[in-house]
Image: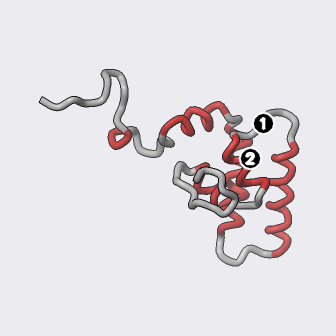
Amino acid sequence: MGIGPPIGLVHYENRPAGLAQGPRGAILKVMDSARRQRILEALRRLAAPSPSKDAVLADVKLLDDELRAPSEALPGDLDHYLRRRSYGKALAYLVGGTPEAGTCGRGS
């Protein structure tokens, strides 16, 4: 007889599809969904092959404006990635992936 996870907890392999792992999921659920969607769409456009210069400038401005928005703070890691313009890491974070380690020493 093996010991499993405590009753009431869902093992990460059995979580519903699309649910972000760990505490990040709870943090992202608290974030304003319209704001999260704006950021996610801008990051996806920036990741698209060959975006136009005007589109890149518009999306970078949108992301900069989101960082300066006084309404609410962004989750710590997302704020960190956006301030450092690590847009690939920010996108991975928002879709529930694991961003690659960087050179700033954070998270190592």
At 65% from the left and 75% from the top, the residue drawn is 49
**Where does the N terminus fall, quadrant-wise?**
top left
Q: Position of residue 42 (x, y in %)?
A: 73, 58
Q: Position of residue 41 (x, y in %)?
A: 69, 55
In the rendered image, the vertical position of residue 32 relative to residue 89, given as above or below: above
At 58% from the left and 53% from the top, the residue drawn is 108
Res. 46 image quadrant: bottom right
At 77% from the left and 58% from the top, the residue drawn is 84
In the rendered image, the vertical position of residue 58 relative to residue 34, given as above or below: below
Pick whichever, 104 or 43, lies toward us: 104
Res. 31 image quadrant: top right
Q: Position of residue 34 (x, y in %)?
A: 71, 40
Alpha-carbon neighbours of circle 2 within 10 Å: few (<14), some, or many (≥20)?
some
How is the rendered protein coloured? Answer: secondary structure
Contact, mark 1 vs mark 2 (Cβ under 8 Å):
yes
Q: Which disc is residue 73 wearing? A: 1
Identity of the residue furthest to the left in this view? 1
Q: Which element type, helix, strand or loop, lies under badge 2? A: helix
Q: Which element type, helix, strand or loop, lies under badge 1? A: loop
Q: Earlier in the sequence, mark 1 or mark 2?
A: 1
Q: Amino acid at mark 2?
A: Asp
Q: Which residue in the protein does label 2 denote?
A: 79
